[in-house]
Image (cartoon, helix red, strand yellow):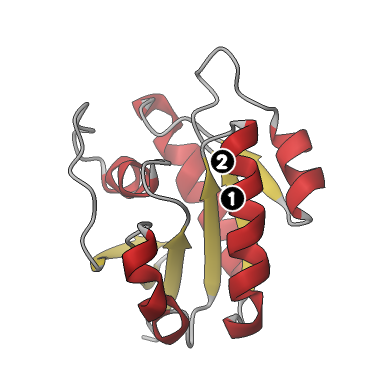
């Protein structure tokens, strides 16, 4: 069985690791420790084995991204749905698009926060298909799985 690779990128603190915890059905910690370098989680989506690569968002780790992004079947860029982060996310997208040979989608995370920008606004600004999400809402686990399953197949 072929193993699909999904890379999750974005600024530090936007909820990348929390999204993976949600997918895995793990407890989402209120106080998260930032990812150092890279974390890889194995999962099954739509009956297919997947490796989900959680790339650390701090600037000091981004020099590794271009190598990690190779041979990804899907790249997911995560934004925390704030204007400030959206501008940074757009810059990341511009900077790393040349290393992507995969499909790319965006997750407008933290939709549960009062001042969150809508997924439509995030999509317009980034220019890639965008889904709204709240990684801390365990009731959205199936939705997150469905998004990745759909985008991997499509």
Horizontal side of residue 79 vs 37, given as left or right: right
Position in image of residue 49 (x %, y %): 35, 73
Q: Residue at x 23, y 48 (%)?
A: 34
Position in image of residue 5 (x %, y %): 42, 76
Establish if 11 lies above or below 71: above
Single out the residue that lies furthest toward the top.
114
Q: Residue at x 82, y 45 (%)?
A: 124
Disc 1 vs disc 2: Cβ atoms closer than 8 Å? yes
Q: How many marks?
A: 2
Quarter occupied by the N terminus: bottom left
Horizontal side of residue 87 vs 78, given as left or right: right
The answer to which image quadrant residue 42 occupies is: bottom left
The answer to which image quadrant residue 47 occupies is: bottom left
* Residue density around tag 1, few if under 14, some if 14–19, many if 20 or more, within 10 Å: some
C-alpha distance separating marks 1 and 2: 5 Å
SS assignment at label 2: helix
Position in image of residue 73 (x %, y %): 53, 77
Horizontal side of residue 6 vs 44, given as left or right: right
In the picture, the disc for residue 85 is 2
SS assignment at label 1: helix
In the picture, the disc for residue 88 is 1
Q: Closest to the observer: 15 or 148?
A: 15
């Amino acid at each position: 069985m072929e193993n699909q690779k999904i890379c999750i990128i974005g600024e530090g603190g936007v909820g990348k690791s929390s999204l993976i915890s949600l997918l895995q059905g793990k407890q989402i910690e209120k106080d998260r420790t930032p990812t150092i370098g890279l974390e890889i989680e194995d999962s099954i989506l739509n009956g297919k084995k997947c490796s989900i690569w959680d790339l650390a968002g701090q600037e000091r780790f981004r020099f590794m991204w271009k190598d990690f992004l190779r041979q990804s079947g899907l790249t997911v860029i995560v934004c925390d749905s704030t204007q400030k982060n959206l501008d940074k996310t757009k810059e990341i997208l511009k900077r790393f698009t040349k290393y992507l040979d995969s499909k790319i989608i965006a997750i407008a995370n933290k939709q549960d926060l009062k001042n969150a920008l809508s997924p439509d606004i995030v999509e317009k600004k980034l220019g890639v298909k965008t889904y709204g999400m709240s990684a801390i809402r365990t009731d959205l686990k199936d939705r997150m799985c469905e998004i990745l399953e759909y985008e991997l197949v499509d």
